[in-house]
Amino acid sequence: MSYETLLVERSGAVARVTINRPEKLNALNGKLLGELEDCFRAVGDESEVRVVILTGAGEKSFVAGADISELSVLSPLEAREFARRGQRVFGLIEDLGKPVIAAVNGYALGGGCELAMACSLRVAAENARFGLPEVKLGVIPGYGGTQRLARLIGKGRAIEITTIAEPISAQEAYRLGLVNQVVPAKDLITVCEALAGKIMANAPLAVKFALEAVNHGMEMTLEEGLFLEANLFGLCCATEDMREGTRAFLEKRPPKFTGK
């Protein structure tokens, strides 16, 4: 795949997607959103790809937010569609059916923070900064920030971050539960690749169903979530990988999963 705003590389079953607008601190614009959507649809359809690592070009920024020059001229109806489009693309990433690891290498502000939250896991470099500063511009987060942040760190903290609108450090983001790990910048991609390796040692369909159970169960009552979990557990038991995994455990050997 060839894009103007993205770099896509593959190493075995890992796809690494780099947002490549370093001169604009990787800010999101319409072109980038469209290419993100196309890229993740393609990656989602590739059975060979098991995990995606998403990062930003350069050392300063993961994604520094939306392109304000585009945002500033929107009418109310255009702004609503602007938000819905971003929500759709980020929803695609969240529900890809494969783990997406955000390697946050710098500023993750506004739409960048929202993009990181749509990923399955977030690993931050020590210099990373997170925030939702939209109210300073007279708007609110529009790409899912008000919803995903509260689900990740709780209502009170989410209100604090969205209304005070000041960035927080990687260490504070870790303390709040917004990121999974904080690592030296030089180790960021290596750590993400190691996480990908650990995930890929497991059954692909089971990983897919586990993501589905967590993501969709969050929107359900406990009873509904338990029903979803039981159904997905049943589907797992119809797979060849379940037979292989249980057999390998009993035979005290490593399993050889095929994703079937």
Image: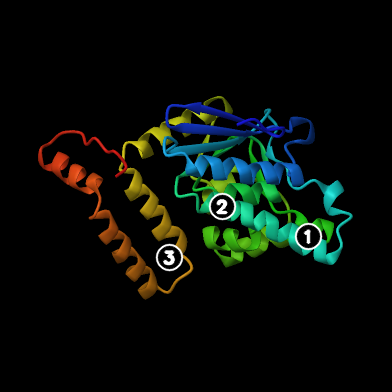
The answer to whether residue 193 shows anywhere in this view is yes
Quarter where residue 73 is shown: bottom right
Would you name the residue on which mark 3 appears?
A: 217
Would you name the residue on which mark 1 appears?
A: 135
Residue ID at (56%, 24%) = 186
Residue 135 locus on image (x, y percent): 78, 60
Taking depth in this image into account, of 86 and 258 the one nearest to the observer is 258
Would you name the residue on which mark 2 appears?
A: 92
Residue 222 locus on image (x, y percent): 38, 72
Residue ID at (32%, 60%) = 232
Locate the C terminus and report the quarter of the image it occupies: top left
Q: Is residue 256 above or below residue 208?
A: above
Name the kind of residue labelled 1 in the image: Val
Quarter where residue 228 is shown: bottom left
Secondary structure beneath dot 2 equals: helix
Gap in angstroms between the C-alphas marked 1 and 2: 26 Å
Residue 12 locus on image (x, y percent): 43, 27
**Nearer the camera: disc 3 or disc 2:** 2
Q: Earlier in the sequence, mark 1 or mark 2?
A: 2
Residue 22 locus on image (x, y percent): 74, 31
In the picture, the disc for residue 17 is none
